[in-house]
Structures are given as structure tokens and as C-alpha cells.
Image: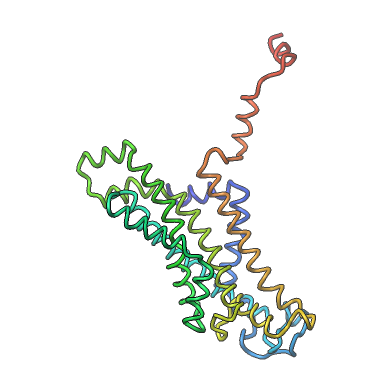
């Protein structure tokens, strides 16, 4: 399926179009952060806890930093962690899931045992232990920790789907023709897993962004790097709520909630497009109207 066709399908779905608009807005804001904010995110430019005004759109924090500059610059770090961890999670899930499902036997047993071990270990406590052991973890380290501890569920789903695809006629025909295993996986199996991979990727991005903000809010991140989680950490350490500086909490919470809602709507839309039973298109509603039983009076009028 070509990219213009995929984009046309996404824009034809209201949830996908709305979610894609939110995500693209945040991505553009992150790319053009230096142009959108005139102040440096770590430079003192105002009084402590200055409320929003014409000069400072989102106000300032206890150290006099411009929150709008931190808001736009923090989008870069948070999106980098989200997309980086999402790509790592999907790469591990695809590689391990397809390998276990296609080859079976001892390979499947070993990889399934590894999946079960990772699934049994509580994820958030493990992240807290690893992050606290490392100390002030940088965003790259946080993305790697999330990626290497969050792939098991997606791998299990992909393995189950691969087991079902392995018994299909086109896969068996390719094996009979003597096609190598790598070509069968890349050409025959992988294209049929695109919808599952897409849903897993977007879900991993949401989880990574929220987890990164949680770790940094608890003080396990690098305070010298500006991100939405560090903004929450600074607001907590300065007792922003107690002194009435509600805008310090509002900015990062709004960003995380809005971006998460946009990604979730995009996730639901991809699920609807991939699963015909969940579709709610106009054509489906029209088909339901035509398939509905006609009342006796209306039927008599039509025959008359």
C-alpha cells in the first residue's frame, strides 16, 4: 500500500485525522522550538513565580525561567524519548515474536520462556530500580531502559499472529517452492502484521512519554535537561501548588495529556481501519440501512 493511500485512509477517519493533527502540531512545535520561543529555556528572564502575561505566555517558575521556552524545548526531549523507545520496543517485539512464531520448536520454547519472565516482573518497579541504580539518568538512558523492559507484551501478540499466519496457504506455498525463511518472513508474514505493529508502536510511544515523565518527576532524571518531566519535578521541588503557581503544573500536564489523547485517538483509528468489525464509515451505515428489514406498510407502498 502506497503512502498517499495510507494518508488518504487516515484522513478519511475523523479520529485519525484529529489525532494526527495533534501529533503533527507537537512535532512541528518541537522542530521549530528556537523560533517559537525568544528566550533560552535555562536562562533567568523574569521574577520567580510570575503569572502568565503578554511577555510570558505561560509565566515563569521559581528560578525565573520562561515556561513557554521550556514547554517548546521540552517537547523535543519527550518526543525523542517516546519515539526512540517506541522504535526499540517494536524492533525487539517484531524480531523475537516472528522468530518464535515462525520457527517453533526449541527456539519458540526459549523465546516464550524469556517473554514470560519479562512479563512476570513488574515493569514500573523494575524501571524505578534500574533508574535509581544509574542515578541521574539522561533521556537516552531512560529510553533504552523503557525499550529493553517493555517489549514482551508486543512480542507475545506478534508471536500469536505469526503462528496463525504460518498455517496459511500462501506461506505453505512459498515453503513448497523453496523460498528462504528470511524472504517468507519479510514478504509473506511481515506485511500482514502491519496493523498490529502500528498499534503496538503508538501504544509504546504513549507509555514511554508517560513513564519518562514519571521517572523524572520522582527525581531520577537529569535536572540539567529540559523536558516535560523535569518541569513537573521543578514545580514539585518549588512547592508551586502551595504558593499558588498553578501554571507551572498546568503546562507540562496539558502537553502530556493532549499528546497522549492524540496518540490514543490515532491508535483507535488504526484499529478501526484494520478491523472491519469496528469500522463506522458512512458506507457501512448505508449498508446497514439497506440490510435492515423493511416494515410491512413500507413494503406494501413499494409494491403498489
Depth check: 41 or 271 in front?
Answer: 271
**Residue sitting at the far top:** 304
Q: Quadrant of the C terminus?
A: top right
**Residue sitting at the far left:** 178
Q: Give residue 238's quadrant in the image.
A: bottom right
* Number of numbered discs overlaid on the protein picture: 0
| Scheme by which the image is coloured | rainbow
Q: Position of residue 126 (x, y in %)?
A: 49, 71
Q: Position of residue 188 (x, y in %)?
A: 33, 45
Q: Residue at x 67, y 78 (%)?
A: 68
Q: Residue at x 36, y 42 (%)?
A: 165
3 sits to left or right of 96: right
Q: Is residue 30 above or below residue 61?
A: above
Q: Give residue 219's quadrant in the image.
A: bottom right
Depth check: 87 or 289 in front?
Answer: 87
Q: Position of residue 236 (x, y in %)?
A: 68, 81
Q: Residue at x 62, y 84 (%)?
A: 41
Q: Residue at x 53, y 58 (%)?
A: 203
182 sits to left or right of 49: left
Q: Is residue 262 above or below residue 79?
A: above
Q: Position of residue 297 (x, y in %)?
A: 75, 14
Q: Give residue 113's quadrant in the image.
A: bottom left
Amino acid at each position: 500500500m502506497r503512502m498517499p493511500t495510507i494518508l488518504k485512509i487516515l484522513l478519511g477517519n475523523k479520529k485519525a485525522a484529529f489525532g494526527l493533527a495533534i501529533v503533527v502540531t507537537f512535532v512541528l512545535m518541537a522542530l521549530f522550538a528556537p523560533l517559537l520561543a525568544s528566550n533560552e529555556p535555562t536562562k533567568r528572564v523574569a521574577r520567580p513565580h510570575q503569572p502568565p502575561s503578554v511577555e510570558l505566555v505561560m509565566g515563569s517558575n521559581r528560578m525565573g525561567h520562561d515556561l513557554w521556552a521550556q514547554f517548546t524545548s521540552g517537547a523535543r526531549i519527550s518526543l525523542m524519548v517516546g519515539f526512540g523507545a517506541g522504535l526499540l520496543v517494536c524492533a525487539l517485539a517484531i524480531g523475537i515474536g516472528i522468530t518464535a512464531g515462525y520457527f517453533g520448536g526449541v527456539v519458540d520454547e526459549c523465546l516464550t520462556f524469556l517473554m514470560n519472565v519479562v512479563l512476570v516482573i513488574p515493569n514500573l518497579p523494575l524501571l524505578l530500580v534500574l533508574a535509581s541504580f544509574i542515578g541521574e539518568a539522561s533521556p537516552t538512558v531512560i529510553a533504552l531502559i523503557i525499550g529493553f523492559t517493555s517489549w514482551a507484551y508486543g512480542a507475545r501478540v506478534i508471536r500469536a499472529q505469526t503462528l496463525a499466519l504460518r498455517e496459511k496457504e500462501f506461506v505453505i506455498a512459498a515453503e513448497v517452492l523453496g523460498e528462504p525463511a528470511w524472504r517468507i518472513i519479510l514478504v509473506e508474514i511481515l506485511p500482514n502484521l502491519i496493523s498490529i505493529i502500528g498499534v503496538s508502536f503508538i501504544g509504546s510511544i504513549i507509555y514511554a512519554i508517560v513513564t519518562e515523565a514519571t521517572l523524572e518527576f520522582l527525581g531520577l532524571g537529569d535536572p540539567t535537561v529540559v523536558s516535560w518531566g523535569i518541569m513537573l519535578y521543578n514545580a514539585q521541588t518549588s512547592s508551586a501548588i502551595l504558593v499558588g503557581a498553578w501554571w507551572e503544573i498546568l503546562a507540562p500536564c496539558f502537553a502530556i495529556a493532549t499528546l497522549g489523547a492524540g496518540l490514543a485517538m490515532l491508535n483507535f483509528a488504526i484499529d478501526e481501519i484494520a478491523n472491519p468489525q469496528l469500522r463506522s464509515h458512512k458506507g457501512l451505515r448505508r449498508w446497514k440501512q439497506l440490510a435492515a428489514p423493511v416494515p410491512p406498510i413500507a413494503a406494501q407502498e413499494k409494491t403498489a
